[in-house]
Amino acid sequence: MLPVSLGLAAAVLSGCMGEAAEPVVEVVQPEAPAFHFASGTLELGDFDPATLGDDLFDPCTEISAEEYAAAGMTGVEPEPVIAESSNGLAEGCKLDKREVWATRSVLAARTDLADVQDADGYVVEHPDSVVPELYTHTVPSVNPYQCVAQVDTVRGGLAVAVSVSGLKKDEIDVCEDAKVELEDLFNAVQDGER
C-alpha cells in the first residue's frame, strides 16, 4: 500500500507543479505633480471654473508662514482689493517687497488656461519650468510691467503676480521674476523638503 500512496502523492504534486504561477506585476501610477502644503496636497490639474464654487484654494490661510518663508516670501497678508478688482475671480495676499521696485502677490484664480487664452489682449507664454504646465500671462495694453505666473490645480489657479515700476522697469523680465517666485514656492513644499 505504501507504493500506491507514494505514487498518488507524486501524481498530485506533479499536477500542482505543472501549472506555472503567473508573475505578479504591480503597476505603480506616478504621483500627480502637486504642492505638498502642511494643510494638504494641492494637485496640479484641470478644474472647471463654472463648478468650482467655494472650493477655491486660499493661499492666505492654506499656506503656512513657514512654507512661505522657505520660499523666500515674507509679510504675507490678505489683500481684499484683489477680490474686489477682479469681480471675485481671484483672491490673494500681498507679500513684502524683495526690491523697492517690485510688488508681489500670491493669488488663487477662478480662471484657467483656456479662460486666459480666450481673453482679449492677454499674451500667454509657456516657459520652461520645474513646475509642470506653468504658464505666464500679461495684458500689455493695460500694464506691460505686470505678469502673472500661474499653474492650474484641481482647486483653481495658483499664481504669483509681480508688478514693477521705476526707472529700470524696462530692464526687468517681470514674467521671469513671477515664474521664479512660483517655482520657489513649489520647490519649498515638495515631500521631504519641508
Image (cartoon, rainbow, N blue to C red):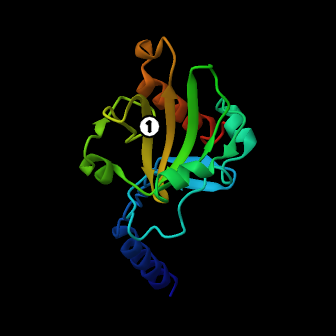
Label 1 amino acid? Val
Q: Quadrant of residue 48?
A: bottom left
Of residues 7 and 35, the one drawn nearer to the viewer in this rendering: 35
Residue 34: x, y in percent? Answer: 51, 48
Is residue 107 placed above or below 187 in the rendered structure?
Answer: below
Is residue 164 placed above or below 5 in the rendered structure?
Answer: above
Is residue 37 placed above or below 23 in the rendered structure?
Answer: above
Residue at horizontal 46%, vertical 57%? 89
Residue 185: x, y in percent? Answer: 58, 36
Residue at horizontal 48%, vertical 78%? 6
Q: Quadrant of residue 26?
A: bottom left
Of residues 150 and 32, the one drawn nearer to the viewer in this rendering: 150
Give the number of callouts: 1
Q: Secondary structure at mark 1?
A: strand
Specify the farthest residue to the bottom.
Answer: 1
Of residues 69 and 190, the one drawn nearer to the viewer in this rendering: 69
Q: Quadrant of residue 49?
A: bottom left
Residue at horizontal 31%, vertical 53%? 115
Pointer 1 local density, CA inside 10 Å: few below 14, some 14–19, many at least 20: many
Residue 138: x, y in percent? Answer: 36, 35
User: In the picture, which quadrant includes the C terminus?
Assistant: top right
Residue 194: tell me if it is visible: no
> Is residue 17 found left or right of 78 in the rendered image?
left
For disc 1, the marked residue is 148
Residue 103: tell me if it is visible: yes
Residue at horizontal 68%, vertical 31%? 96
Residue 189: x, y in percent? Answer: 62, 41
